[in-house]
Amino acid sequence: MSLTRKVAYNTIIQIVGKVITTVISLFLVAALTRYLGVAGYGEYTTIFAYLAFFGVLADFGFFWILVREIANPKADINYVASNILTLRTVLGLAVYVVAYFVSFLIPQYAAIRVGIGIAAFSTLFLALNSTYVGIFQNKLRMDKAAITDVLGRIVILSLTLYLINIGSGLNLILWAFAVGNIVNLTASAWLARSYVKIRPAFDLTYWKAVFLQTLPMAVVLVLGLIYFRIDTFMLSLMKSSVDVGIYGPPYKVLEMILLLPTMFMGNIFPIITRYIHTNDEKIHVVLQKSFDFLLILAVPVTIITIYIANPIIRIVAGGDFVVASTITPIFGVAATSVLALQILIVAAAFSYISIIFNYLVISLGKQSKLIWPNVIFVLFNVLANFLIIPHYSYIGAALTTVLTEFLVLFFTWLIAKQNFDLRLKFNSIWKVALAGLGMVLVFNFGYNYINWIILTVISSIVYIVILWLSKAINKDMFLSVIKRSE
């Protein structure tokens, strides 16, 4: 199979896998929100938001180092993978034990402390599994990673539904995640056995070298997660579990919406890196088409989500989350999960574009240049949340997320421009804006008369037709990016 076919195959497989896991996740969220209620789901959200900070420390950027190391034809894949997995296991155990004991210092977490311990145990296996995902990515066999991921999610969903059916509490439900993640890791190890033989390895000299290489990336990842997740953590300390529960579903939807640009750029990343190393002028074409593609995606995703936020929240979380509120209306609009989602989707639009510049900087090996901007993002986010959450709770947190993502877009673009001959053309913006206006008009005229599903389809068709007529898109737009990898 040619490189083009392999890349295309892996891209399609990842899309299919993500669609399946996203659907499973939606079913899981729907089941948990309806069973646990607003406050109970708030506790669930708080547990995983808290552990997310420690999760980055457990990962420490080892995934990227693994992919880079085993990409070298002269590398001993067994030696590299064995040492990195062993190192991750030791570090992960230490990090999650610390996470559990740190929770004793937070009085507000007394009721969820046992849940934190269970979820920490569960998350460790998920972190270790990414080592095998790196191996699958290197071998262009992401179908195997997709299979194990789907299998693990099915186990989690099945056990969760069973435990809900017998009336189990949150702590017992969290064990379902542990079992599912163990199944995921075990299946990955089994499918990877033909590519690598992993054994416990303790080459401390190599560990030190890997640690020093990953340090800049780890700092960027930690800071990035802090500004992305700190709002939920601060909500849990400054407000009630009900506030966190109201904020949870829209934030989960945001995470799912951000999967597409992350997955797309993950496949484009090796191509960009290769062209940079070879000084190939085709890098500019790939960047331009990536920018156009993600811009064309960002606009309809944003518009559709704003208009159908109510049915989205109703489907994902249930009717209670459509009406639940702990603060007074904002400019006459009820401050519910619906409004939070409508605000957060604007942050997603900024993120769809900033991810291009972020990956470009990493491809250039200039990730250390991202450290100070990320410090700025964290400080701004924490200060803004500290000032606004007491007054506007989860709505304030959503607004802060939008402002932070705008800063991310500006600074990542600036750093990319300073370190690379960026030749992006913005001709497509007015065409995309015109197509977006067409969608808005369709929604405005038909919202009170046409079913939201039909309206979404009609507006999407209008959007595509306008883009086609204005020559903003053609059938080769996406494939031309992939073909340049050959």
Image (cartoon, grey):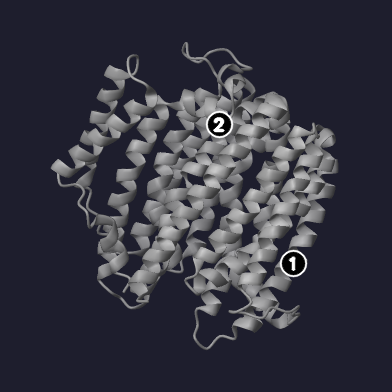
Task: Confirm whether residue 157 shows in the render.
Answer: yes
Q: Which residue is drawn at 37% across and 21% down?
A: 451
Residue on which the image places disc 2: 316
Q: Quadrant of residue 194?
A: bottom right
The quadrant holding residue 124 is bottom right
**What residue is disc 1 on?**
89
Q: Which residue is drawn at 40% across and 49% down?
A: 354
**Image point 35% across, 76% down: which residue?**
2
Report the side of 35 relative to 62 (left or right). right
User: Residue 296 at what x, y percent from top left?
Assistant: 30, 44
Image spot of residue 268 (x, y percent): 38, 63
Report crowding for label 1: few under 14, some 14 to 19, many 20 or more residues within 10 A (C-alpha): some
Among all residues in the image, which is located at the extreme bottom?
74
The quarter of the rendered structure image containing the N terminus is: bottom left
| Position in image of residue 21 (x %, y %) | 55, 49
Q: In the rendered view of the protein, which quadrant contains the C terminus?
A: bottom left
- At a point 75% along the width and 33% down the height, the residue shown is 165
Say which quarter of the image contains residue 113: top right
Depicted 35 relative to depicted 286: above or below: above
Q: Nearer the viewer, mark 1 or mark 2?
A: 2
Q: How crowded is mark 2: few (under 14 residues within 10 Å), some or many (20 or more)?
A: many
Q: Earlier in the sequence, mark 1 or mark 2?
A: 1
> Where in the figure is residue 162, as x and y percent of width and height?
74, 39
Q: Which mark is residue 202?
A: none
* Residue 240 visible to an observer of this rendering: no
Please give left or right for residue 59 compared with residue 372 in the image. Answer: right
Question: Label 1 is placed on what type of residue?
Answer: Thr
Please, what secondary structure does the residue beneath circle 1 have? helix
Q: What residue type is labelled 2?
A: Val
